[in-house]
Amino acid sequence: MNEKYYKQIHFYGRLWMFCALLLFIAIPLTISLSLDAWPTFGEFIKGYLPILTLFGPIAIIEILTYSPMLGVGGTYLGFITGNLSNLKVPCAINAMQNAEVTPGSDEAEVVSTIAVGTSATVTIFILFLGVVGFSQIMPILNSETLAPAFANLLPSLFGGLAVVFIAKNVKIAVVPIIVALTLFVIYPGIPVSILIPLEALISIGVAWYLYKKGKI
């Protein structure tokens, strides 16, 4: 990729990130302006700090973890459209694997950006259809027959992805899996903001140790 490409991606990516932030605050700001109802500083901090404590570390970890996978264009698209871990990242990884490209390469940059963009477009289309026909499909979605499927949708998605990556290098995966399962048994309610960075550090440490020993 030439320098001009990345400059354009960063320019438009930052522009649309800024626009997205404006849209995020547009509704509460409009309500406050219309009704002249503004939270006090104390009330704002009281509501803001718990959210920052929970999602702040997750946001930082997601940027550090997902950006190398998605590339520049995919990162901007993914963080603007959202739902990275559930949809954008799996789509990008699957597309790069099918295209047999190496993450971080110029080819992966293109494939990832197209995959994330396609995923976002399809998601919007499906949501549009869902909104239009929501009243018709609600009884089906809430049926007892489909309830077990929806309850296990996320585990099945990440389970399928996990099998692919674990199979590539079982040696690295064993220790992080054991640690994660042990933590869940001891403390089932462990916050994701603690578990994700902890598992990432453990995985890096195991990989470094095995590499130094010449086992991988």
Image (cartoon, rainbow, N blue to C red):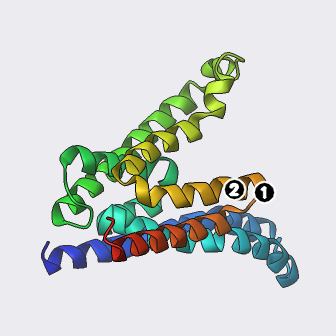
Quarter of the figure with the C terminus: bottom left
Q: Disc 2 designates what residue?
A: 182
Q: Which residue is mark 1?
A: 186
Q: Which mark is residue 156?
A: none
Is 67 placed left or right of 159 in the picture? left
- Check contact, mark 2 vs mark 1: CB within 8 A: yes
- Pick whichever, 129 or 204, lies toward us: 204
Q: Residue 206's x, y, as percent?
A: 47, 69
Quadrant hosting residue 8:
bottom left
Residue 60 appears at what percent x and percent y? 54, 74
Q: Residue furthest bottom?
A: 41
What is the C-alpha distance between the residues marked 2 and 1? Answer: 6 Å
Q: Nearer the viewer, residue 82 or 208?
A: 208
Secondary structure of the residue carrying numbered label 2: helix
**Residue sitting at 81 percent across and 74 percent down?**
38
> Is residue 183 depicted above or below 156 in this figure?
below
In the rendered view, would you say 190 is above or below 211? above
**Residue 170 in sight from this viewpoint:** yes
Residues 40 and 157: in front is 157
Classify residue 177 as left or right of residue 194: left
Residue at (37%, 54%) from the top-left corner?
169
* Label 1 residue SS: helix
Q: Amino acid at mark 1?
A: Ile
